[in-house]
Amino acid sequence: SSRNQEESDTAGVVEEKVVKVNGDIAIRRYNKGRFLGKGGFARCYEFTSLETRKIAAAKVVPKASLAKARAKQKLMSEIKIHRSLHHPNIVSFEHFFEDNENVYILLELCTNQTMNELLRRRKRLTELEVQCYLMQIISGMKYLHSHRVIHRDLKLGNFFLSDKMEVKIGDFGLATKLEHDGERKRTICGTPNYIAPEVLDGKQGHSYEVDVWSLGVVAYTLLVGKPPFETSDVKTTYRRIRMNAYSFPDHVPLSEQSKSLITRILVNDPSKRPSLDEMLDHEFFHQGNSIPKLLPPSTLACPPSSSFLRQ
Ligand SMILES: CC[C@@H]1C(=O)N(C)c2cnc(-c3ccc[nH]3)nc2N1C1CCCC1
């Protein structure tokens, strides 16, 4: 009820009842701190464990919003998939529990928010920065795909930035796990932002290639400053995607390598798109002052753009 919602909205301590193996009940307490924002049905806060003093980013999902089976299944699927993932470029899933009012999901705190905020501040990034961020995202996606997980909603708002500006892929609310190789998914609920044409077309199902498509949209958006198919109306955007109607604006100086990479990825036939490894082999990642190939991407803090770095 709204009164409970109000109560749980005030600052305070959240208690988790833990049943021990010998049947004793232990209580874990968390301090509910700063409001971080809304994410779907959830209100998100900093949670500090009073036991370990560790701070997490918590999604607090009111059980009232889980009354419908579909919403409950979606949340359980998100938890089941996310808690099984462990990689430096995937948001780490710390813990989850419930009380009478809410389900609590505790996630890695990413104090530099998401790449959405980064791009909003910067208008657009240098090619060197985009190389560096994309390498980390591809590293996380190689891990996901090798575990048969398709994210299906890769977008700047789901790329979280740690205090060290490392990229962490988050929000597995639309993710799916393939049960066997070659399986093709038929449906997607929700409105993935950078939706691939085969998902719109819906005839031959979709698979890992939808995540590769999204990467093309992400690369274009970071380098140009706005998404390739964006219009004021969703239907028009979908038509542009189906028509593959995008172009590189004249006023944005883009290298041939950048345009070539994006053009290679944004093809409507999913079987013609590069694999993640083929993307990393593209000249875009080896142009100019390229990043030493030997260092794992996650150990690289992406160089902030400044005049002498601007190509
Ligand atoms: C908890 C939900 C979501 C999230 O999934 N993570 C990992 C996250 C991490 N740090 C933060 C964060 C730390 C400092 C500011 N935000 N935020 C995260 N969010 C935001 C909260 C509001 C909308 C999405």
Image (cartoon, rainbow, N blue to C red):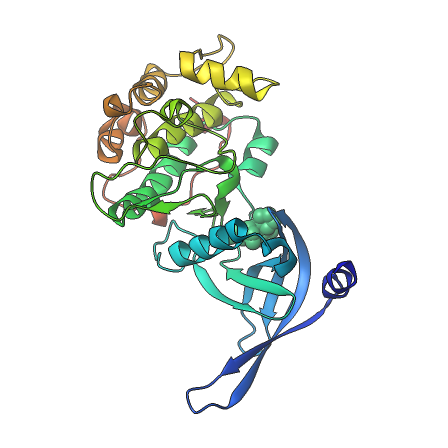
Q: Is residue 204 above or below residue 4?
A: above
Residue ID at (44%, 18%): 241
Q: Quadrant location of the C terminus? A: top left
Q: Position of residue 154 (x, y in %)?
A: 44, 37
Q: Is residue 162 above or below residue 270?
A: below
Q: For the image shown, how many numbered marks are present on the structure? A: 0
Q: Is residue 87 above or below residue 242?
A: below
Q: Position of residue 193 (x, y in %)?
A: 50, 31
Is residue 12 in view from this perspective? Answer: yes
- Report the side of 279 relative to 73 (left or right): left
- Report the side of 210 relative to 227 (left or right): left
Quadrant of residue 49 within the rendered picture: bottom right
Q: Quadrant location of the N terminus? A: bottom right
Q: Position of residue 259 (x, y in %)?
A: 36, 16
- Report the side of 11 relative to 288 (left or right): right
- Report the side of 49 relative to 128 (left or right): right
- Residue lying at the far top of the rendered structure: 250
Q: Position of residue 175 (x, y in %)?
A: 41, 45
Residue ID at (45%, 57%): 79
Q: Is residue 178 above or below residue 238?
A: below
Is residue 111 in view from this perspective? Answer: no
Residue ID at (49%, 28%): 125
Instruction: Return the residue nearer the eye: 250 or 41.
Output: 41
